[in-house]
Amino acid sequence: MGSGESTTRKVSFGVDDEDRVRILRGVKLSEDVLQRMRGVANIAPDRPTSPASPTSSPQKDTGASRSASSSPPPQQSPKKQAQPGSQPGPQPGPQPSPQPGPQPGPQPSPQPSSSKPASYAKEEQKRYERQQAALKAEQAKVEKREKDSAREEMTKALMQKRMEAEHAQKLAQQLQKKDAQLKALDAFYKEQMAQLEKRNSEKYIQSKEEFHSAASKTEANVRSRNMNPVCSGLQAQILSCYRDNGDQTLRCSDLAKQYMQCINAAKKNLLVNHG
């Protein structure tokens, strides 16, 4: 293109399942394009390619068309030899020179297709990084949840131990307080008992002294008198009778009557004598 001697050529290419160009026929690529394609192929991940039926379609070559017009590829010669009887068509006349405009860069036409493996690799890398980030985030959540659970259980255990220790301390304080109260009551009761014993002892001594003093005064005031026993013989007989006749006390009734008569007679004599 761009010169009057250039002719139209049939260019075919094959793509794989991921729309990446794998086979080119009818186009001779420059060394720069081949180097770029080799670099992209080294970066892209290795995947098995399925054979695809080549579809013929006209391709516009920007940087490599000039080299393709000068030397045709070897694949084109069999197709030309297969048509010896075909008459050549009308040759195109000299085309007008193109107007000056912005010239495209030295990039080849299959550049968008060759950039797909790189973008696919980048997407795979990004997706892998996202998965790794998600896994790390999930792992961090699980670890945080486990740490929180362990911390909560430890806090509960510490609180339980602290409550048990406080309860035991309260019970110990209550026991100490009760023991102190019991000791105080014991000391108080002992003191009261000592005071009571002292008072009783003092009162007993005082009463004893008062009794002896009163007895001494009474003995001094009362005159001594000689008393003879009355009816002593009958008393001895009655005692002997009751001792001998324990089961038949009626046999001693006569002695008892005599004793009573003797006593009454003695009383009358005393009244007569002291009257």
Image (tube, grey):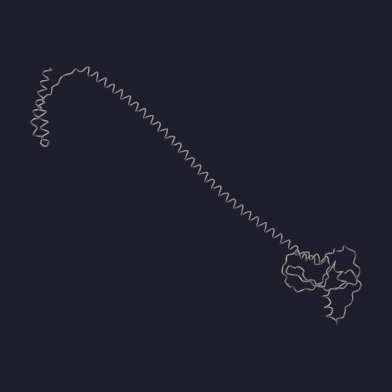
Q: Is residue 155 above or below residue 241?
A: below
Q: Nearer the viewer, residue 58 or 232?
A: 232
* Left or right: 40, with 196 as reference point: right
The location of residue 230, given as percent across then percent down, is 11, 24
Q: Quadrant of residue 17?
A: bottom right
Q: Quadrant of residue 59?
A: bottom right
The location of residue 257, given as percent across then percent down, is 9, 29
The location of residue 7, given as percent across then percent down, is 87, 73
Give the position of the C terminus as an image quadrant: top left
Q: Quadrant of residue 136?
A: bottom right
* Left or right: 44, with 90 as reference point: left
Q: Is residue 43 above or below residue 153?
A: below
Q: Is residue 4 above or below residue 180?
A: below
* Left or right: 209, with 118 as reference point: left
**Of all residues shown, which one is farthest toward the bottom?**
85
Mark count? 0
Give the position of the N terminus as an image quadrant: bottom right
The location of residue 87, given as percent across then percent down, is 87, 80
